Amino acid sequence: MSEEKNKTLKEITKNKYQYGFVSKIETEKFEPGLNEKIISLISNKRKEPKWMLDYRLKAYKILQNMKVPDWANLNIKPIDLQKIIYFAAPKKNQYKSLDEVDPELLKTFNKLGISIDEQKKIAGVAIDVVVDSVSVATTFQDTLKKLGIIFCSMSEAIKNHPDLVKKYLGSVVPSNDNYFAALNAAVFTDGSFCYIPEGVKCPMELSTYFRINEAGTGQFERTLLIAQKGSYVSYLEGCTAPMRDENQLHAAVVELVALDGAEIKYSTVQNWYPGDDKGNGGVYNFVTKRGVCYKNSKISWTQIETGSAITWKYPSCVLKGENSIGEFFSVAVTNNFQQADTGTKMIHLGKNTKSTIISKGVCAGKSNGSYRGLVKISKSADNARNFSQCDSLLMGQNCGAHTFPYIESNNKSAIIEHEATTSKISDDQLFYCKQRGIPEEEAIGLIVNGYCKDVLKKLPMEFAVEAQKLLEISLEGSVG
Amino acid sequence: MLKIKNLKVNTETEISILKGLNLDVNEGEVHAIMGPNGSGKSTLASVISGDPKYVIKEGVLEFLGEDVSEMDPEERAAIGLFLSFQYPVEIPGISLNNFIKTALNQKQKSLGLEPFSAKEILARIKENANALKINLDFIKRSVNVGFSGGEKKRAEIFQMLMLNPKLSILDETDSGLDIDALKIVASGVNKLRSENNSFIIITHYQRLLDYIKPDFVHVLSDGKIIKSGGPEIAKMLEEKGYDWI
């Protein structure tokens, strides 16, 4: 690597995280610590019914007998659950009209580039915004209501649609699934709930925006999405956090249920604060995402992961019904000292089930990126098919890319294909671009976007451009 | 336009390639450079366009009256230098269309000009694609990925026409082309040829020069120009080989 490139590589590491501001919103928060009393307080604060409190306390009991998983290719500092604040909320929440909203909060939205007013109406995106622990605004509820679609915060769902919540909450990711799922079940404070009735094609993108604001708080949101028979929905979540010296914990659970013939597209643009160029601070992102596919249904996960100090995340599909389809498209970018261990699980149970995995890792700086995936074909899954492609792009000489693909086939009729590549941006590619007048940073952005194109094109149009820019910002100038 | 004086160039690994080369190219001139394998033709093209793989040890390299020896390749491109690569590199996932748009507007930006509108660009793309008998579907394909040898060269000439450079260097653009493709490529060059645009054409064969009439022909051998003259030199080389000199 030439001197000049070393210099540019250093320059990017100075790249500022543009969402790293803190909003001075008046918040109400609990003392740090985790115990039954805190859990009861959370439940109480949210005026939850007793069944919900019981659900939480049961999860807390499970949690006490579990350990932080250590099988991932991650170096995690011990997490002290007693030092985390489990509830923080802007003092006034759930606004009926925009006039009621705290101007500081509106400023925050503007800085984030989300306007919960006219602009988005034109774009036709319904948004639920979750700041720290609670949902502060959900737009378009009325329009959606006419179609029978429920799109609201989890707290409202518990209040207004208890039967649906009781039936599906924990049905895909049970509390005893893993340590972070148990923690989430015990202390989750809000999140989004979405229900699409039979045969309804949701006419707009549904979107949730997550923001951690308060210091020392964990964010534990819970998302539950149910697509009834023959329905369709496209859902997108985005996340940011302020710059903090200490590590903040984010442990979310997302459950998707695609009933017969339903289709769910779930896209994530994850841009939590990744920590500084010395490896201080940044969000610990431990997320459990899973969907169940019934007969003829389809779930597509698309994720663009550029943020977080640590990412531990495996959006998965349980292909229960015949002819169901699971897809996973991922771009994971790590820079500086970021670590990512991410991938998917495709569990084939039904006949003629199909899954596709396309994972693109981009590693720069001193970061480490791992793909970890499981393709499991059970005895009952006749004629199951899987195609996996795992590519890694390395930038510089101090980063690492790792691939851990697991395949378990218990049925002879299965066809499983796996392809993997590791590559670098070549000097020749860079010179070619520069000769055409494209400077180094733009050239890298262009080449990385080209490399990720198969995944980017799966994103809803409105967000594909944002995601492309995000990739360029995350990687400006890093070459090897 | 281009002034090269006593240019001595080494590779990064300190192997001497150009050993005191002199060349002057004025506005509107077409210079052909011929010479045996390993004489330094491609190195010359790379050095003029700023490839970091080569190190200038001594000499003068001026373009448009400016010393460009320390300039980044993208800056040289911005002021009007173009290289048609001998081996164009693949860029997966980026369409030729998108690539050339980016290059074009990047150039505008470097010159402090407004970007072209999508409409303007499209009109130029259509015009130049037509001139080179390029199908618009071809422009949607990823840059050089899966292109045949002929398609790659045609794509290079297409980019040249789009960027409208002052000086174009064609590094063996004719090798691997069949006669029809050769004529198309030559027509592209002739389209751009004017009293303001100059060309350096690096080739092994006389046949390209049948379609692009050079003003000067130089013979490069062991890092130096050992003979210069008119088109008749190319004919003699074709007949008698390099031993003739």
Image: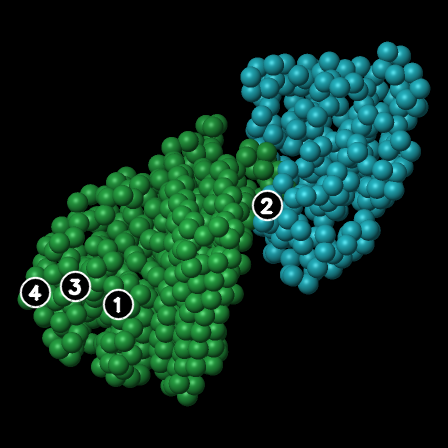
Chain rendered cyan: B
- Hue of chain A? green
Q: Earlier in the sequence, mark 1 or mark 3?
A: 3
Which residue is identified by label 3? A59
A181 over A151 or under it: above or below? above
Q: Counting other residues with Cα less than 10 Å from the Cα at mark 3, is it few (<14), some (14-19), or many (20 or more)? A: many
Vertical relation: A419 (above or below) A241: above
Q: Is residue A441 left or right of residue A72?
A: right
Residue labelled with disc 4: A36
**B85 or A374, nearer to the observer:** A374
Disc on res. B92: 2
List x then y, in percent, for residue A87: 16, 66
Is A470 rendered above or below residue B203? below
Mark 2 Cα-neighbour bin, 10 Å: few <14, some 14–19, many ≥20: many
Q: Are marks 4 and 1 in contact (CB under 8 Å)?
A: no
Q: Residue A429: x and y, percent?
A: 58, 37
Mark 1, residue position: A170
Task: Identify residue type, mark 2.
Answer: Pro
Q: Nearer the viewer, mark 1 or mark 2?
A: 1
Q: Is residue B244 left or right of residue A282?
A: right
